[in-house]
Amino acid sequence: MTVVYSVTDDSGSHVAWYQPSVADLIFLAVVFLALQLGQTELLNDPGTGWHIQVGRAVWQSGPPHVDSFSFTRNGTPWISQHWLCDALFSWLYDAASWNGLVIASALVLGWVYRSLFRVILASGANVAWAAVLTMLAAGCAAPHWLARPHLLSLWFLVLTFHWCCEYFRSGSRIIWLAAPLFALWCNVHGGFLAGLIVIGCSLMGQVLSGPRDDQWRRRLAGFAAVLAVAVAATLANPYGWHLHTHLGKLLFTSQVRDLIDEWRSPDFQLAESRPLEVLLLLTLVLLAIARRRVDLFSLLHIVVWIHFSLSAVRQVAFAALIVTPLLAGLTPELGIALRERFAPGGWFRWIESLGARARAWTESERAAHWPVWPVAASVLLVLAISFGFRVPALGIGTARLSPVRWPIAAVERLNEEPSTGPLFHDLNWGGYLLLATDPLRPVFADDRFELYGREFLVEYLEALQNGPAWKRLLERYEFEHVLIRPDLPLARKLRESPDWEAIHADPIAVLFQKRSSMRLALNDSD
């Protein structure tokens, strides 16, 4: 048998609308876990602050076309690939502070993995395997559970892949929803490129599959048309085709990817890479022992996305969403396959017994279509935040920035200074500074690496190590304050310099002020 993507008929199953399904329980589990992490961890992305500020700018004057947040690139052409999501972020933050962002992120994650569970279940897995594969995919993405626009890309990718598989399997017309989805997606996050890759791989998978009859030709033409429509839909953004060239520059010609941790290959010595390792090994095992053969459509997707996951850490979350539903099609009759390859015994009979029970449960689970519990939980969480309720045990109303990651005390001290001259700082704190400084200070740099370019970033890194670049930057920008980590060579150098004085120091950050600026401030006060 070569078909791995199949659905069991559940027309005879009946489930009460109010009865929570396994999909609902997965939703609630993911949301609860995200809320617990969200008290600090969901807010650890260095870009969250500038996303909020970009969103505020969108509400005031529309999507930005030039940078207005840094003094080093002020007025430089810049494209916000996620302007629409940034506008939503700023609205949530201004309405409910960090709690609004955390609740929204947790709910999106819940819907992502509930949707993935349903897709895996439709792919042929029983309810137990579907739950295992779903949580494995969640584990692969957990390091990227951050309040960032890419969370919506995870959800949109699940939908796109599901629609492609449905069209390949049955010619379902639901795939034409790709047109409005991509028109929205291209304004939310640059991850729409991953969706186009999925459709492109599906087109190639159709080319490689057979038999080459009239149905094959109709679906081949259908995939080609959907790809063309999806590409055209991505032009429905404020920047037109310039958005695509911007993303192409970031991916291929900006030469900054090797300076960004999430664009590097996974380090399998780290604990966060263990779920990916399990996924890769499970893929090899199932391909070897499953009774069903994987078809070329599925194999192409598996190979392409495993390649992406091994090329860049940030692609691991996407790859898990594609590979797990395809592995689900290899799990039916797995107990029989194990018994055929190994000596029969009580252990395998016990596994087969569990499989039979899971299959019976699966029929009722497939019949549970209405997401009553997720919708109710979503509404309750939104109401809780709207009315300011706090439930610390559930992580509701307790979101805050981590004081061991962000220079909170140092920035409070900076805000007391009368001078608002140029500030040199850790670029990972740039987004936070854009949100926390009062009055608002343009930043030296932030994590929009494509805006600053490789030469700038290399010079910045050299300056942190107290290299010759520090003197060049100091002469060029005439910094009045320096805010960096206390363990850096530059911090040790400034402590010894008669030209600088540490006006705040803690284990997270040290704030230096140029002595000439201090004298100027004293003269102004006189």
Image (cartoon, rainbow, N blue to C red):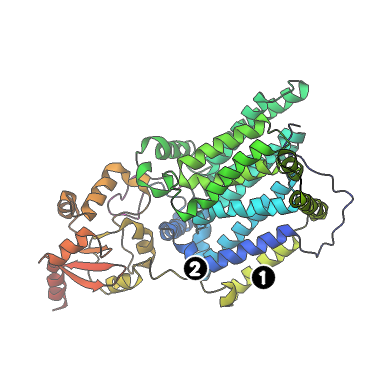
Q: Residues under labels 2 and 1: Cα distance? A: 18 Å
> Residue 288 versus residue 181: which sits nearer the camera?
288
* Whole-percent x, y for residue 43 in the image: 46, 63
Residue 277 x, y percent position in the rendering: 53, 47
Is 77 inside the magenta-drawn segment? yes
Q: Residues within 10 Å of mark 1 (few under 14, many from 20)?
A: few
Tell me the kind of residue under disc 2: Trp
Residue at left offset 45%, top offset 46%: 266
Element carrying mark 1 = helix
Chain part drawn in magenta: 67-81
Quadrant (top left, top right, bottom left, bottom right) of the N terminus: top right
Residue 306 part of the magenta-drawn span: no
Which label is found at residue 310?
none
Q: Name the magenta segment's main secondary structure.
A: loop
Q: Tell me residue 133's x, y (percent).
A: 65, 50
Q: For the residue carrying disc 2, how many other residues have a C-alpha within 10 Å: few (<14), some (14-19), or many (20+)?
A: many
Of callouts 2 and 1, which one flags the residue occurring earlier in the amino acid sequence?
Answer: 2
How many marks can you see? 2
Q: Secondary structure under badge 2?
A: helix
In the image, 283 versus 175, the foreground residue is 283
Image quarter (top left, top right, bottom left or bottom right) of the C terminus: bottom left
Quadrant of the image occupied by residue 282: top right
| Picture quadrant where residue 32 is located | bottom right
Residue drawn at x 39%, y 45% is 78
Specify the amino acid type for callout 1.
Leu
Residue 90, image x, y percentages: 49, 61
Q: Residue at x 50, y 39 (%)?
A: 308
Residue 418, placed above or below residue 61: below
Mark identifier at residue 380: 1
Please state which of residues 145 and 152 is positioned toward the viewer in this rendering.
Answer: 145
Q: Which mark is residue 98?
A: 2
Question: Considering only vertical position in the picture, is 288 above or below 354?
Answer: above
